[in-house]
Amino acid sequence: MLALAPDEPSRRAAGRLTGPGHWSGTGAAGLVAWGRFAGSGQAPYQTVIDLSGPAYACSCPSRKFPCKHALALLLDWAGGATPEAGQPADFARSWVAGRAARAARAAQPADAAGPDAPPGPGAEARPGAEAGQRAAQRRAGQRQARVAAGLAELETWLRDQVRAGLSGTSGYRHAEQVAARMVDAQAPGVAGTLRGLSGVAGAGDGWPGQLLGEYARLHLLIRAHDRLDELPDGLAAAVRSHVGYPVARQDVRAGPAVSDRWLVLGVRDVLDGTVPARRILLRGQRTSRPALLLSFDPRGAFAGDPDAALRPGMAIEADAHFYPGQPALRALIGSRRGEPGPAAAPAPAGGVGRLLDDWAAALALDPWLTSWPALLSGVPAPAGDGWQLADPGGHAVPLRVSGSDIWSLVAVSGGHPVTVAGEWTDDGLRPLTVWHGDQAVAL
Amino acid sequence: MSAPLGYDDLVTAATVGTGRGSLILGPPAPGSPAPGSAAPGSAAPGSLAGPAGAHAAVLDAADPAAALLDAAALLTSARRAGRRAAAAVLPDPAPPNAAPELSAGACAVLGYALRDRDLLLLADLLTAAAAAGFRAAAPILPSLLDAAARDSALCPAVGAVLGERGRWLAAHRPEWQRVADSPRPARPEAADLAETAVWLTGCRAERRDWLAAQRQREPGRARELLAAGWSRETGDDRAELLQTLAAGLSAADERFLEDALDDRKGQVRQVAAGLLAALPESAFVRRAIDRGAGTLRVERRGVRPELAVILPEPGDGAAARDGIAAAPPASAIGAGAWRLTQFIAAVPLAEWTARLGLAPTALAALPVAGGFRADVHAGWRLAAVGQRDEAWAAALLDADGDDPPDRPPAAWPGAAQLAAVLPAQRRLAWASELLASRGPSRESVAALAACPGPWPASVADAVLAHFGAAVAVGATRAGRDAMLLAPVAARKLPAEGSRDYAAELRALAGTQTIDDGLAGKLRRAADAVARRRYFLRELH
């Protein structure tokens, strides 16, 4: 939080200005907080902060931005010292409304995050001001139009690629330019997919087939987006999520809760662009539903997110709220009933056949899926240069592991079937956890 | 109409480019030529293979590129959703384990030792686990095998806890296999003498065990078998197999060993010399006595006797053949002085007491004329270690004290090496005396480290008292010296019983006056003791 301070003195000064002795009339509504600071002047300074920006306003004469008063208010707010209020104070409301109106006029800055990114600045609904809500609706309409225009350009580009022939595709980052265009068009999910193609062209034997498959799926996404309003809700939501429309966490939390004891199947840390992200796979012990939590932490410590502390093999009794989309997978943890605790190994799951059936069923609902949670029983076995997971029925899928990552799994298995959780992808099963008795071993 | 188009057909068309009109795709339009196909006389649009064929109506009619992307979307979705399983090739499973597995908590302690690269602690823990009949749990096996593959000193300890699962796993990687069958002690009881094929075709370790078993039963026959195939063995095999003659060694082996002194491989010559030195009647020992016994003489100058030295002449080829090296191991040691040291080292120690008429303690206490004290004592120290002579080791430890000359270990076996010759009780008594008289120094700490743990309460108390003294004086020489002792205390302080030494170390580390470096060392030692305590409890 103090990283927002313009310099060290401001940081130190802000720390001294917190607390009720200096402030009056403080309050917070949603992501807006305000207060009056008794400074050296006659009239108190009026300070407002909007964390969705973040943006700050203060009537003090300081030329630093944010000023120490805004920082102090931020610290108080972060410490929970700012009381929740239904309506912002007048001076705060007029500032928020003014900002919303300006935002509606000006083009929104590009949302550079990936499809699974935390909701961007425009995503959280502004509480209070009606003007803000109207502006948000208008923005949503503008966004869809902007996305549609961007996708139309991408469609032209895709057809040009196929018309001219993939053999002409050259360069490690051949799709970088059009990806940047998709960022401008507020389709970060598409931009991420395009950037992911950087290494495909010219790599390995089957690259034209792989590239064509990726192009075809983007093409399919564009055709679906063209008819977004005609699509069934679930499919439309899937399309929106792959394009990269943001969804506000509070809207997800407001949706229905799935109450269960959620077992953590696996945890994987990835980089989303440059932002550290943690993928946490859950499985409801009563409902058998899969769920995926995503935690983002630009600072890399995941310190603020209790869900990010979940480790494989733990279970927690809690409400899960699923994001819109089909099949439902990404979720948030709502209210918890108790702390996460150790759990027994999941019941012996199906084999390879069941995994592939699940995958086909999931693809039927969302053909753009790139991975799906897997829980199955099998034996890791060498196959050619790599490894496969073979079930006792004689069916096998490739294991997607690099170098030394395979050995814990092999050691625990000892050539016997073990329960493995992971992510199924087109390239094979990426194992995340294996159970050694009731002990979950992260791979 | 041609055969239905598959995904590979689309890839071919897309690779070349639809601009060349190589592939016609579009919704089936009965009777009319496909729209968008400008080429005259073009064929009817191709249909799509598999389930995608039913959806051909959605293909874009206006643009061949779009139609191809449509078709590719259909076929790639069908392909992904229709993914088939591969045929499984099941591996040979590991045989069931007889020994119980270490608990997850105990393995977590091993994990800490691995993470901290505390290999001595790791080896202690693994040895204790093996002695209690446990084997390592499967999840930690890869890390243990990796650690032992990097540092061969860990091999025996890791090898002892592998169990069936670990040996099965080790077979997957050559560097792990080397850990699994490296320097385990020979197990003659494991060999079946009736299986002569083992001797002819087994791996080195199997053949060694077999030969050792043969040696136990018929020593002469074992030697004859070894001699019969000697010229066909590799150098490493010769060295390893020759060592089995140490058991049941007798004068009958001398001839064969004499011949081995001329071996091409230095290691074989070394083993042969070592075995011959253990045969008191051998020509090898007589040669050593002839060369070395004359170099020392007791002379009385006034009332005080002293040891006079006659520097030996440069050795001939025979001396080199008997393992006398020409080059000193350090440039500060002169060639003649080094010869003196080696000649003395080769003489059986009993020879000195017999010839000079004095007991080891008296000889070791004598002043040495001509500034050769370090060279003479170095020879005796080498001999005491090589001949495992308790009386001499104790005498030299007393006489040489805690002030080692600046020499490499090859020219001056350290106090710890000498102490290792003493029986455990005596070694510990000597080490704690050394600690009491000198405080924690390089020598006294090494001596304590060479004693088996856990320490009795008296030694533990003495060590804690040194920490207490060092803690009180802050960042001083004494504080720094105490730091040397901390890692040894971490391994040797008792971790079982009523006294909690971890807590005592932590209390010391929390003292106000303590130097930061020492505080850190003591806290780490406290953690290690606490982890050992936990680990040992898990073994019950």
Image (cartoon, coloured by chain):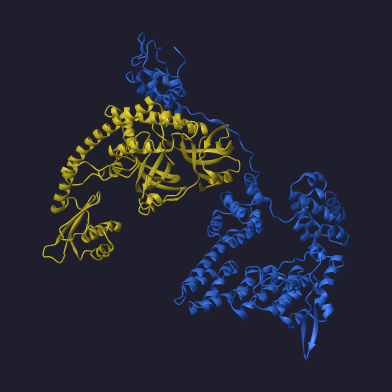
Q: Quadrant of residue A291?
A: top left
Can the viewer see residue B426? yes
Q: From the viewer's perspective, is B95 left or right of A151? A: right
Quadrant containing the C terminus of chain B is bottom right
**Along the line of sight, the residue nearer the viewer: B133 or B383:** B383
Chain painted in blue in the figure: B
Q: Is residue A5 left or right of residue B528?
A: left
Residue at 57% x, 37% y: name it.
A385
Asked whether residue B540 is in view, the answer is: no
Q: Quadrant of the N terminus of chain B?
A: top left
Looking at the picture, how far across and down is residue B174, in whole percent? 64, 46
Quick check: A413 left or right of B280?
Answer: left
Whole-percent x and y of residue A89?
Answer: 15, 53
Of residues B508 and B500, the one nearer the viewer is: B508
Direction bottom: furthest residue? B302
Q: Is residue B233 left or right of residue B407?
A: right
Q: Residue at x 67, y 76 (%)?
A: B430
Q: How many marks?
A: 0
Out of A389 and A183, give the one closest to the viewer: A183
Residue ranking furthest to the right: B252
Residue B157 image-quadrant placement: bottom right
What hue does chain A carry in this figure? yellow
Residue located 38% across and 31% down the image = A366
Eyeballing the image, is A376 above or below B59? below
Q: Is residue A222 above or below residue B238?
A: above
Measured as percent of width and height from the top left, residue A153 is found at 29, 31
